[in-house]
Image (cartoon, rainbow, N blue to C red):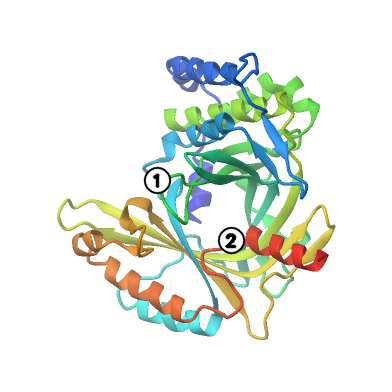
Amino acid sequence: MTIFRTLSKIKTFSAAALISILFLSSVGQTQKLCLDQLSGVSSESTSHFVISKKGSIKVSPKIGELFIDTATSQLNSTTGNRTELKRTVLIEKLSLALEKLSQTFPLKPRDTIKAGTKNVTVTQYLNILKFDYKGQELSVKIRFRKYGTMRTGLPNIPENVQFIPEMKDVSFLEFKIDHPDFDNSVLKPRGLQLDSDIQMIGTPQFLAQFEQILERAVGRNSKNIDSIQTMTKMQNLLKYLHEVGVPLQKDSRTIYERTSYALPAKNIETNAEHEIQITIDEGILIYSYPHDKTIDAYQSEKPLAVVELKIPVEMIDNRTKSFSDQFLQLVPALKKIQAFLDDLTSAQAPGFDMNKGKQSRIKTMLENNEE
């Protein structure tokens, strides 16, 4: 699997990484000043967070700015800075749309699928945090993601997952942040972290062992300066959340079969290569920790899939929520991808909202059950 092969190239902490950290010391000092400004010593400072009657947590705008700052090094990445267009469709209708798309693009899965198995993704979520930013309320999901395989025919439960060797004791720590400038878009800084260190998040041990946790986290992400910078900022922000007492508790866990594709699209004017990503999730099960309940949030008479197009934010027209006319002209391949999206939109299953994620659906279902 491509992402798995990439993982295997990540080196342990080295002298080169140490040099990079020293190079980034000025960046670290800048962030430290930002954190110091949030210490509450100013008479103009506001509360670090508030909890509503329904239990939702809103952190201060300054903390929100720090979340956004962690994504600085991801702005040129489709993974870290993207528009997400989601559709929920019947598998049979998805197959027809994919068949048409395959006439233009060779649809080879990004991750190898071995015979008799399926690729699965398991993700743990903490409670969602919200914050005000430039006149809008944004949210951030802190999550921990693992990849593995499962024998075909087995139910999608964690006990049946064989995690890939490279992720035996690590997960991707990710901040999935609502994009402040584009609708249906996210910023997503991420990096590898030891599971044993992740288990300390939300406990006093995280602060007590922070220096060692930070060193291990940077060591796992020392392949380049951007990775070091991103992980350093993420760890420092987690530290600050602990210091000011923001609750960080397990909220939910998702598990599903995922197939993904990467479609190349060349700009005929600049020859720049763009990448549009498509993910297809099936057999989605969501476990709620507060309710101690597993929910099949996409149950229907016929099998459904959640299809998501991940698109560089600059390609989307915020008004039409589709590819901009400019990019459709400069990148001709986008017209076929737009046709695929149109097919999915026409096939959208009744009762499911477009552009709504799995967490949004489970919360709606749980709230409806409580009423």
Image disc number at residue 77: 1
Q: Dividing the picture into quarters, in which one does residue 344 lie?
A: bottom left
User: Residue placed at 74% from the left, 50% from the top?
Assistant: 251
Residue 224 shows in this picture: no
Q: Nearer the viewer, mark 2 or mark 1?
A: 2
**Residue 361 in the image, given as x and y percentages of width and height:** 65, 64
User: Residue placed at 51% from the left, 39% from the top?
Assistant: 133
At label 1, which amino acid type do we have? Answer: Ser
Q: Dividing the picture into quarters, in which one does residue 225 lie?
A: top left
User: Residue placed at 76% from the left, 47% from the top?
Assistant: 55
User: Residue placed at 76% from the left, 63% from the top?
Assistant: 366
**Residue 301 in the image, given as x and y percentages of width and height:** 67, 86
| SS at mark 2 in the image | loop
Q: Which residue is mark 2?
A: 357
Q: Give the left or right position of residue 146, taking residue 87 as reference.
A: right
User: Which residue occupies the foreground of this view, 345 or 273?
Assistant: 345
Q: Is residue 256 above or below residue 44?
A: below
Residue 94 shows in this picture: yes
User: Which residue occupies the foreground of this view, 244 or 75?
Assistant: 244
Q: Is tag 2's residue or tag 1's residue first in the polypeptide sequence? A: 1
**Residue 203 in the image, given as x and y percentages of width and height:** 79, 31
Q: Residues within 10 Å of mark 2 (few under 14, many from 20)?
A: some
At label 2, which amino acid type do we have? Answer: Gly
User: Which residue occupies the foreground of this view, 361 or 303?
Assistant: 361
The Cα–Cα distance between marks 2 and 1, rounded to whole angstroms, is: 21 Å
